[in-house]
Image: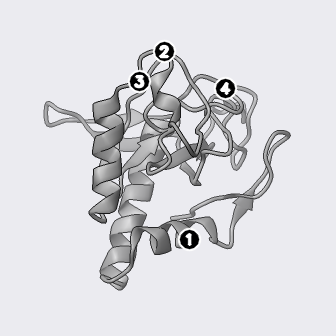
Amino acid sequence: VNLSAGSLMPRPRTSGNPCDFFGGGDQQISDGIAALYAAGIPFVIASGNDFQVNKVNFPSCIPQAITVGSVVSFVAPDGLRFGNRVGDIASYSNIGPEIDVLAPSEGIATATNNGNYMIGSGTSSAAPFIAGVIALLKQAKPTATLDEIRMALATTINYKSDIYYSNLPLVHL
């Protein structure tokens, strides 16, 4: 499952009561994500685009979610996007220890709901990359558990760091 949605109140992930219940989180959504995970179905979600450090949006803060942040993959002719260069962790990407993996996020061609295409940017453009990577991992090793897939994502040989976080896994496609 790939989802790009979130609340307007980013919050940190916790191991006990997930971050989702303070300020409007929904127990049913949290339970649903946990049930998917228990059934071996990954729930990939964008971290949000609120320029937040140490916080991601609900429901990406739920521990069973595979949370995706973004890396700048395309910039305007001036070479910058929100002060970032290609390869930087995107400054708009909510970032924190909840992030499981980073993916490209700029100038991504995507299908619309009316049969057309558009160019998108942001963590909502990065998350589908990871859903696709997970599908390829499952195709290569159908018996892989979600814990093994998370480990494969976390131990990619490419890592990115910024002034806030070091060694976040980055997927190159």
Horizontal relation, residue 33 to residue 149: left or right: left
Cα distance between the residues tagged 3 and 4: 18 Å
Near mark 4 (Cα within 10 A), the count class, few <14, some 14-19 or many ≥20, is some
Q: Position of residue 117 (x, y in %)?
A: 26, 37
Cα distance between the residues tagged 1 and 2: 31 Å
Where disc 2 sits, the SS reads loop
Disc 4 marks which residue?
52
Where disc 4 sits, the SS reads loop
Cα distance between the residues tagged 3 and 1: 27 Å
Q: Position of residue 54 (x, y in %)?
A: 70, 33
**Label whose residue precedes the other's in the sequence (1 or 4):** 4
Disc 1 marks which residue?
151
Residue at 33% x, 46% y: name it: 33
Cα distance between the residues tagged 4 and 2: 16 Å
Where disc 3 sits, the SS reads loop
Q: For the residue marked with disc 2, what is the amino acid? A: Gly
Q: For the residue marked with disc 3, what is the amino acid? A: Gly
Cα distance between the residues tagged 2 and 3: 6 Å
| Disc nearest the viewer among 3 and 1 | 3
Q: In which image quadrant can residue 110 be found?
A: top left
Horizontal relation, residue 50 to residue 161: left or right: left
Q: In which image quadrant can residue 26 be found?
A: top left
| Disc nearest the viewer among 1 and 4 | 1
Could you say which disc has been placed on residue 23 in the image?
2
| Disc nearest the viewer among 4 and 2 | 2
Near mark 1 (Cα within 10 A), the count class, few <14, some 14-19 or many ≥20, is few
Residue at 54% x, 73% y: name it: 152
In the foreground, 50 or 7: 7
Disc 3 marks which residue?
25
